[in-house]
Image (cartoon, rainbow, N blue to C red):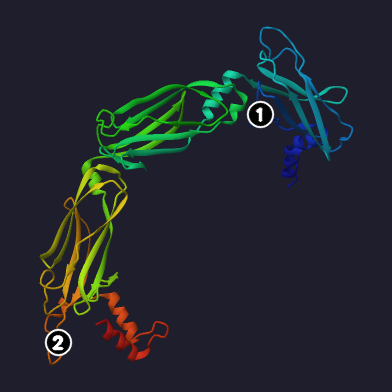
Amino acid sequence: MIKTFASGWFAHWPRLARQLWRAEVSDARCFSISRGVTLELIGELVASAECLEIQFSVHWPVLWKVKKRMIGIRWVPGSGHRSTGVHRPIPYELKQFSSHHTTDVCLRICGPLVPYRETLDLELVDGPEQRPLAHFKFRLLHRAAVESRLLQSLKARNSRLWVQNRTGCRPAQVVGATSGFLVAEFLVPPADWSAFAPPVETILKVELVSPRGRVEIERQPITLTSKAFTFRTPKLALGDQDLFPEPGNYRLTVSLGPQVVAVLPFEFIGQREMLHRIKVPQISISAQTRAGDLVPGLTTLRWEEHRAVLASMQISSDISAPDTLVNCNASISEGGMVIRNEDIVFPLDRPSRTIKLHPLEFGVTGLQTQPKPARLTVAVTVEGEEKASMVVLVLPPERITNFEGQLTFEVKDLPFDEIEYNQIVQRLRLCDDSSPQRGLWGWLQSKILRD
């Protein structure tokens, strides 16, 4: 026990001795200020800055008197100069604030530093005796280093890729050979480093990266200033087989000097894949009553109440290709017999369109009367691929039972429409979800209604 205590005491003794007898200086914080922009760097200062600020914190021993301590700065002579041998005094302002056992020191250097200085060496000293507390060496960044940091910090914002054709401009994530032209635009906001550098001359380069390689699209000299830079690439013909030789993943890269500031990926697909991506998200059914009114959203029609069924379909696509014609077929069939068949041809020039079919009338020219319900299937096919279908039930005008109450056809031929069933149950108030039937009678009722 005594041995463990002694080893712990000796392990903490150096730290305790420093706190009691030696002052400690924390790492310096470096700030470069110019045109209202403040850069904080680690161990580095911008030589051309309008103002430099270095902050220290001195932690005094517990037994020392803090209020009588005065901190000073001493420049290290000779170090950090080039071969010119010129030594000029550095104008500075020093402020310090003491509280408890800590003194905060702020060194402020006004005006740009001389260009022949590579580093800034200084010592933090204590009292009239100029007793050294800590030594610091800061690297000074001159024009070449600032321009390099400026280019490295540039990043494009609001990068957008457009497909441009006779129908207008649309965002381009997936394109085809018949989509028109490809255009990219982006914004390069000014970086904080722009406040510390004069206008920078560099090269703007735009490249198209395809599965077969890299092609340079644009190269031009530009001047970077403290203002935002906006650029729009030239139009790229998507039908150009030299630029777009095959389907696959492509990207446009934008570089300013050696720095890539924007990458815009997109997918280039063929004609077959373009047609495969067409979707039919919705088929809508409306019924025309005997009085001539239209009732939307029905899936069960009655011969006595309605005289025609009207179908419409919504077609959507995320690809803009106005030069591509799409062959669409809409059919209404009962069983294996097609009652109505319509062919529609439309260009792929908009994100969504609604196509209305001709009404299917009940009677001689359309759906024939029959003693059992008719199950009509509305199907939509695009380029031979079925995209969507739905079923409509038409109840016949005749009685479905004979005089003894027996069905005149097989019960499996009577389709079940859940929406209509729920409406009938609600009208007759056969069930109430808020107060469900319990016991044997409730169980029998649920079984009978389910069967």
Instruction: From the top left corner, tell me how far across and down residue 151 is, in percent.
Output: 52, 26
Horizontal arrangement in the rendering, residue 253 relative to residue 284 (left or right): right
Q: Nearer the viewer, residue 275 or 352?
A: 352
Mark 2 element type: loop
Per the image, the residue denoted by label 1 is 35
Question: Would residue 359 be visible to someone looking at this image?
Answer: yes
Q: The disc labelled 2 sits on which kind of residue?
A: Thr
Q: Residue at x 72, y 8 (%)?
A: 86
Badge 1 marks a residue whose secondary structure is loop
Q: Which mark is residue 287?
A: none
Question: Which quadrant of the figure has residue 361?
Answer: bottom left
Q: Which residue is mark 2?
A: 401
Residue 61 seen in this snapshot? no
Q: Residues within 10 Å of mark 1 (few under 14, many from 20)?
A: few
Q: Residue at x 38, y 84 (%)?
A: 432
Residue 17 horizontal/vertical position (percent): 79, 35
- Residue at image position (25%, 39%) is 178
Quarter of the figure with residue 111: top right
Q: Where residue 207 sits in the image (x, y, percent)?
A: 37, 28
**Image quadrant assignment for residue 84:** top right
Q: Is residue 267 left or right of residue 71?
A: left
Residue 355 in picture, x, y percent from top left: 25, 57
| Label located before the other in sequence (2 or 1) | 1
Could you give the CA–CA distance between mark 2 and mark 1, rounded to whole angstroms?
93 Å
